[in-house]
Amino acid sequence: MERTNEMVLEFDSRSCNEGFARVAVAAFSTQLNPTLEEVADLKTAVSEAITNSIIHGYEQTVHKIRIECKIVCHDFYITVIDYGKGIEDVKKAMEPLFTTRPELERSGMGFAFMEAFMDEVVVVSKPGEGTQVHMKKTMGRPSHPFEE
Amino acid sequence: MRETFQVRDTILTVLVPKELDHHTAEEIRIGADRILERENIRCIRFDFRNTEFMDSSGIGVIMGRYKNIRLVGGRVSAAHVNGRVEKIMRMSGLLKFITVEQERSWETAGQKGGSYGAHE
Ligand SMILES: Nc1ncnc2c1ncn2[C@@H]1O[C@H](COP(=O)(O)OP(=O)(O)OP(=O)(O)O)[C@@H](O)[C@H]1O
Ligand SMILES: [Mg+2]
């Protein structure tokens, strides 16, 4: 049997929930025995994805954001989902410093941080249907010295 | 409790909260701009002594204030920045625009507020 553990979180796209969602995901990740740096990386990436759903996906109207987490051995998988506006050109959107909302003081660094702090980032999006950001990070030290 | 916004002469000091994200960045933006409109501010100093988390929203709110104050020839600096926050600032290119006051965190540890403002 694979050692897996899953968690799902769904909440309103209000900015006051950003801190809660980060902490919930970080708390779930602690069973991997991650370093402080790894938890900080995960929190930053989660925060970027959620903020994008609130600002860009739902354009600051209140709908649901869904977070799915899965642990498989030392791999942490997380998907952040919104059912909002979607992205026309994902490749372009992921370029550092690209933003469609400079007037809201966005600087186009969100995806760059996600890519820097996670091992894998895959964005699946369809205009009018929403966006899914799939991320993976291997974290934590093996709990047993002879493991791996 | 120290105030989030403090004005001394032409310096506005913003005490950045524990977590600087989209939610708290909005509060900082509104509060700081209200003061910038009313007072003659030439320097905005972001004090990160309490800050453990910052993401791109923090970059945005600092850059936004930089753009505003640059119009009147002012400048922006950051103090008590921890390693994590500095890394995020560096990656975003923000450090090209603002100065980080050099100080090791252990020099201020345990004397929170003690030497605050003494060199100003
Ligand atoms: N969930 C989403 N729904 C719709 N569009 C999105 C979503 N996430 C990102 N985008 C689009 O991709 C662009 C780039 O996103 P990214 O997070 O890199 O930068 P930003 O959000 O514009 O700025 P920053 O993250 O620095 O505040 C956004 O400007 C937006 O157009
Ligand atoms: Mg973003």
Image (cartoon, rainbow, N blue to C red):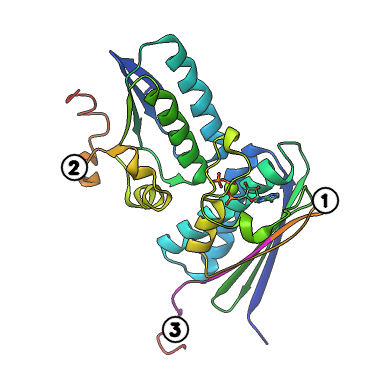
**Which of labels 3 and 2 is toward the front?**
2
Which percent across, then down, holds residue A113? 50, 56
For mark 2, what is the residue?
B107
Report the span colored magenta: A133-143
Residue at x-position 43% and y-position 49%: B92
Q: Is residue A8 left or right of residue A143?
A: right
Q: Is residue A70 magenta?
A: no
Chain containing mark 2: B
Of residues A26 and A106, the one nearer the viewer is: A106
**A140 w.r.t. A62: above or below:** below
Q: Are marks 3 and 2 in contact (CB under 8 Å)?
A: no
Estimate the spatial distance between the alpha carbons at disc 3 and disc 1, rounded to whole Å: 48 Å
Q: Residue at x 37, y 19 (%)?
A: B72
Decide which of B73, A2 is in the foreground and name it: B73
Q: Which residue is mark 1?
A: A128
Horizontal and vertical percent position of residue B96: 33, 43
Q: Is residue A75 visible?
A: yes
Q: Which residue is mark 3?
A: A144
Q: Amino acid at mark 3?
A: His
The percent position of residue A17, horizontal first and vertical second, equals 64, 42
- Please tell me which of labels 3 and 1 falls first in the chain: 1
Badge 3 element: loop
Front one among A36 and B82:
B82
Under tag 2, what secondary structure? helix
